[in-house]
Amino acid sequence: MSDLILVLNCGSSSIKFALFDASTQPLPRKPLWNGKVEGITGPAPTFGETGAVPGPIVLGGERPYHAALAHIRERVLARLGDHRIAAVAHRVVHGGSKYFDPVRLDAKVLADLKDYIPLAPLHQPFALEAIEALLLSNPELPQVACFDTAFHHTMPQVEQMLPLPYAVWERGIRRYGFHGLSYEFMSIALAERHGEAARGRTIVAHLGSGASLCAMQGLQSIATTMGFSALDGLMMGTRCGSLDPGAVIYLMEIEKLTLDQVGHLLYHESGLLGVSGVSSDPRKLLEQEAGNERVQAALALYVRRIVREIGALAAVLGGLELLVFTAGIGEHNAEIRERVCRQLAFLGVALDDSANAEHAPTISTPTSRVTVGVEPTNEEWVAAHCATRCL
């Protein structure tokens, strides 16, 4: 009988899961089996797993999220065979100013993490719901939280502070940074692929439905675009990114939007979707770009914000030697990469069009002053690896 680590990555309408063989060392990066439930809160939820085409499932009752977890549990139990679940690892977005390392979960830790729900309302509640359900149904099963904020703990204080009264800093209101599990994997994968060069002045672009950049030196985070919340920084699929707070005051004071209405607008109605009025997915926008001025504006703004922030982080680093794209858009959308790199020619970026079209590991030309790469991320493996350290 071998031990498995079950990884749960819970979002507001989806749950991704993966099983890793913890009896094999080093921990294999490819899961034995993985899958996801999508559309949990919608009219047509689906379930997909390794080797099978996603298909519809029924999530009845008043608690569809619990029903989705129960469905995953049934599928996992049906596939265990001669294996046993040694632990469950959870991607938890926010560890606040208290949790920087993976931690074994219990009622006290869970209560602490609930205090951070307002800091990550799109993700934190759902991970905690899964944790609480497992604590109640199987209290002896070890559960470990792995935090998306933890990787950025190495940022200097000047990058963590907000220009607000000092008492605010003392209360823990600061720039935390996110996508840490992805960046932690990049710190490992880039060292393997690029050797000593990866320890230099590096920027990683995690471009998915949520998006951020991380400036690394010595394979550690020294600056990032997301700050106190996952609203900050780059323009995203439905989130605004950096925004003049005066605009929020105006919406509430003059246009009389309530706090809930403003929150919904910033998290769910802005970004690519809000500007284009069409979609939050760059692939769909690129298909409809010709002749649609709002789509053109949305894509131009999306690229401009990435370019602007890369320039800012390059200034913090004192130059740039390695630029890497990762996550769904970063790994698979050659057109977005090309548009970003074209505007970075002033830094010495020169793209190899053929390599870019093939999503090659290195997509810059041999003469480019900046090496540009594409590197698949692996957040689930990082979470599983973190869990092994707590067992």
Image (spheres, grey):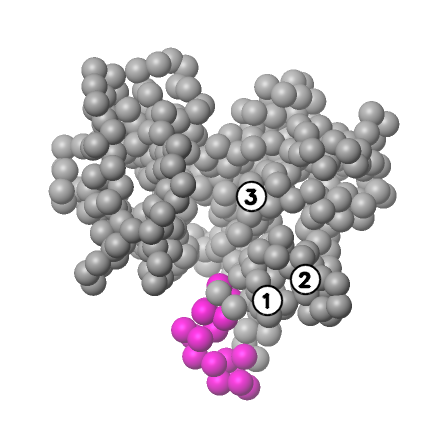
Q: Which mark is residue 57?
A: none
The percent position of residue 351, horizontal first and vertical second, equals 80, 36
Task: Determine whether the residue tagged by mark 1 lies in a helix, strand or loop.
Answer: loop
What residue is at 58 percent from the left and 56 percent from the top? 281
User: Cβ–Cβ below 8 Å for labels 1 and 2?
Assistant: yes
Q: Is residue 188 depicted above or below 177 in this figure?
A: above
Residue that numbered label 3 is attached to: 328
Q: Nearer the N terminus, badge 3 or badge 1?
A: 1
Callout in the foreground (1, 2): 2
Gap between marks 3 and 1 measured at Cα? 19 Å
Q: Is residue 264 left or right of residue 102?
A: right
Q: Is residue 79 left or right of residue 283?
A: left
Q: Is residue 237 left or right of residue 167?
A: right
User: Does the magenta run of residues contain 244?
Assistant: no
Residue that numbered label 2 is attached to: 288
Residue that numbered label 1 is attached to: 278
Q: Which residues are magenta?
A: 251-267
Q: Is residue 304 left or right of residue 13?
A: right
The percent position of residue 126, horizontal first and vertical second, equals 32, 52
